[in-house]
Amino acid sequence: MRKVGIKALKNDLSKYIRAAAAGETVLVTDRGQVVAEIAPPQLSSDGALTSNPLLAEDMRRGRITPALNPSYTPGPKVHVAPFDDVMRELRTDRDKH
């Protein structure tokens, strides 16, 4: 987080907007007092994705986009084999070779 005076902000606004777009919060000061902040936008109204800082950062950088239908929920998990059985089979295979 960085602080910038109003005059410096006015002279270099695009620099501070790019910083906010990259995920940084910029505090704006007037005579040493914080009067405003420029922050990255909150992309999710329900906060589901933006509550996770890593996902929020990826959304800000355009690496991921929110789902078009956020009400979708995946079906139940299907277990193919118990973990212990898989590990036992792996150990058996490793011992044979």
Image: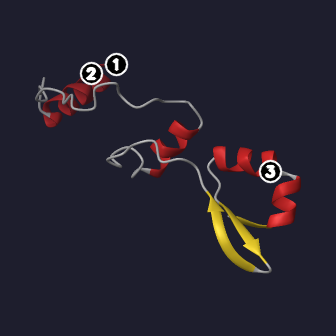
- Label 1 CA crowd tier, 10 Å (few <14, some 14–19, many 20+): few
- Classify residue 28 as left or right of residue 70: right
Number of numbered discs present? 3
Q: Distance between the residues labelled 3 and 2?
A: 63 Å
The residue labelled by disc 1 is 97
What residue type is disc 1 on?
A: His
Give the mark, 1 or 3, whose residue is nearer the N terminus.
Answer: 3
- Label 2 CA crowd tier, 10 Å (few <14, some 14–19, many 20+): few
Toward the viewer: 80 or 74? Answer: 74
Task: Say which element carries label 3.
Answer: helix
Toward the viewer: 76 or 5? Answer: 5
Task: Say which element carries label 1.
Answer: loop
Task: Say which element carries label 2.
Answer: helix
Query: Could you say where residue 52 lies in the image, as x and y percent from the top left?
Result: 41, 50
Indicate whether 42 appears above or below 70: below
Query: Could you say where residue 1 lies in the image, as x and y percent from the top left?
Result: 67, 64
The residue labelled by disc 2 is 93
Which residue sits at x=34%, y=19%?
Answer: 97
- Classify residue 46 as left or right of residue 26: left
Which residue sits at x=81%, y=59%?
Answer: 9
